[in-house]
Amino acid sequence: MTKGILLVRRDKPPRTGLWSFPGGGVEVGETQVEALIREVEEETGVNCQVVDFVTTFDLIMKDVSGKVEFHFLLNYFLARALTENIKPETDEGEVGWFHPDNLPTDMADQKLIDIIRSVHDRILEIMGEL
């Protein structure tokens, strides 16, 4: 049974120090699902199985003059933990399990909370609470 939602405290911009989903870039020749499984394991020590695609968001970052500096396409998936013991990627890192009804107050973005709400009952089902 999964303990809840697995979150990491961001250790780099944007939104350094705030809680977010584990994740990162896709390596050349790697599928999105393979990247998700690898990134979750690297950042948290947890092995997971992807259950479903949830949604996509654009993250557009501008420099001080207002010019677009970076444009990231963020894909969010629902996954089931196959292991529950957590281990941050670095000694300074922080990883935690959170119930979907008791999220940290310092989440990186309202969009993350909205994503969790959109799949709330599915999360509870995976946790064995429904």
Image: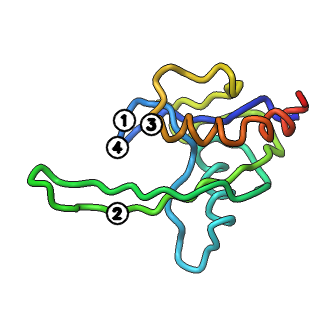
SS of the residue under disc 3? loop
Q: Characterize the local packing of mark 2: few (<14), some (14-19) or many (20 or more) Cα atoms within 10 angstroms.
A: few
Q: Earlier in the sequence, mark 2 or mark 1?
A: 1
Q: Amino acid at mark 3?
A: Asp
Q: Are marks 2 and 3 in contact (CB under 8 Å)?
A: no
Residue located at (43% from left, 30% from top): 18
Query: Is 114 on the left or on the right of 80, as rendered?
Result: left
Residue where numbered disc 4 is placed = 14
SS of the residue under disc 4? loop
Report x, y in % for residue 58: 42, 58
Q: Which mark is residue 109?
A: 3
Disc 2 versus disc 1: nearer the observer:
2
User: Distance between the Cα atoms at labels 4 and 3?
Assistant: 10 Å
Q: Characterize the local packing of mark 3: few (<14), some (14-19) or many (20 or more) Cα atoms within 10 angstroms.
A: few
Report x, y in % for residue 12: 37, 42
Disc 4 versus disc 2: nearer the observer:
2
Q: Are marks 1 and 3 in contact (CB under 8 Å)?
A: no
SS of the residue under disc 1? loop
Q: Quadrant of the C terminus?
A: top right
Asked which quadrant contains residue 10, the reply is top left
Disc 1 versus disc 3: nearer the observer:
3
Q: Earlier in the sequence, mark 1 or mark 3?
A: 1
Q: Are marks 4 and 1 in contact (CB under 8 Å)?
A: yes
User: Distance between the Cα atoms at labels 4 and 2?
Assistant: 12 Å
Q: Which mark is residue 16?
A: 1
Q: Which mark is residue 71?
A: 2
User: Distance between the Cα atoms at labels 2 and 3?
Assistant: 17 Å
Q: Earlier in the sequence, mark 2 or mark 3?
A: 2
Q: Are marks 4 and 2 in contact (CB under 8 Å)?
A: no
Residue located at (36% from left, 35% from top): 16
SS of the residue under disc 2? strand
User: Distance between the Cα atoms at labels 1 and 3?
Assistant: 11 Å
